[in-house]
Image: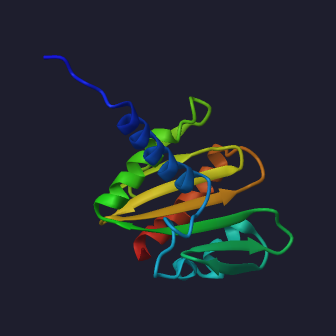
């Protein structure tokens, strides 16, 4: 039996998967990342002093929150994804599949951070994606340079705290 492929359907599926991954990997989209829960409640300024240095302030925007510190170029962005259940699982899988960026980015599975988690070290620092009970949380730690093992070591305890209250 000969299998027939529908070129338009294949393109539609690929574009859909790429769109989800782009939104997840490269920043929050109000259409996909917005959540009714305030991401700024994940941390207190004291939780982030060691990570960011200086006096920490938070600024929320459509389901995400950005923390910065006076005198530091580093920042932490957290996004609670709106999708839940199978949608969150699909978004997680899409992000995980596209995270290696053609082999340019190292992907590490993370234990003890929800049901499933992974981290990547892109050019700006570290990103972590955590799936817990059908909900997806993304943390981006912007260091200004490609992420390092030291950066990842600093972010892990912060991520663990976020998952505990997420």
Look at the image and tell me in which quarter the C terminus lies.
Answer: bottom left
Residue 111 visible, this orientation = no
* Residue 105: x %, y % from top left: 60, 36
Q: Is residue 8 above or below residue 54?
A: above
Residue name at image x 43 percent, y 58 percent: 130
**Which quadrant holds the N terminus?**
top left
Whether residue 59 sits left or right of residue 64 in the image: it is: right
How many numbered badges does the structure rendering display?
0
Is residue 50 depicted above or below 128 in this figure? below
Measured from the top left, where is residue 144 in percent x and y? Answer: 78, 52
Q: Residue at x 30, y 27 (%)?
A: 5
Estimate the x, y position of residue 127 in percent, counting from the top left: 58, 53
Q: Quadrant of residue 9?
A: top left
Quarter of the view holding residue 30: bottom right
Q: Is residue 11 above or below residue 68?
A: above
Residue at (43% x, 37% y) in the render: 11
- Looking at the image, which is closer to me, 53 or 94? 94
Left or right of residue 43, residue 56 in this image: right
The type of colouring in the image is rainbow
Question: Does 154 appear above or below 84?
Answer: above
Residue 101 percent coordinates (x, y): 57, 36
Looking at this view, name the residue that lies furthest to the left.
1
Residue 82 makes an appearance in the image: yes
Q: Residue furthest top?
A: 1
Name of the residue lying farthest toward the right: 71
């Amino acid at each position: 039996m000969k299998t027939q492929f529908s070129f338009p359907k294949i393109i539609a599926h690929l574009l859909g998967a790429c769109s989800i991954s782009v939104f997840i990997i490269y920043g929050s989209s109000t259409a996909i990342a917005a959540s009714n829960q305030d991401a700024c409640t994940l941390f207190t300024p004291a939780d982030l002093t060691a990570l960011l240095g200086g006096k920490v302030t938070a600024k929320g925007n459509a389901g995400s929150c950005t923390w910065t510190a006076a005198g530091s170029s580093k920042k932490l962005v957290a996004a609670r994804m709106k999708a839940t259940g199978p949608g969150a699982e699909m978004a997680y899988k899409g992000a995980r599949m596209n995270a290696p960026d053609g082999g340019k980015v190292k992907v590490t599975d993370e234990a003890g951070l929800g049901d499933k988690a992974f981290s990547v070290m892109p050019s700006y620092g570290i990103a972590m994606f955590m799936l817990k009970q059908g909900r997806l949380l993304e943390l981006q730690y912007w260091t200004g340079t490609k992420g390092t093992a030291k950066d990842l070591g600093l972010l892990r305890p912060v991520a663990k705290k976020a998952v505990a209250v997420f």
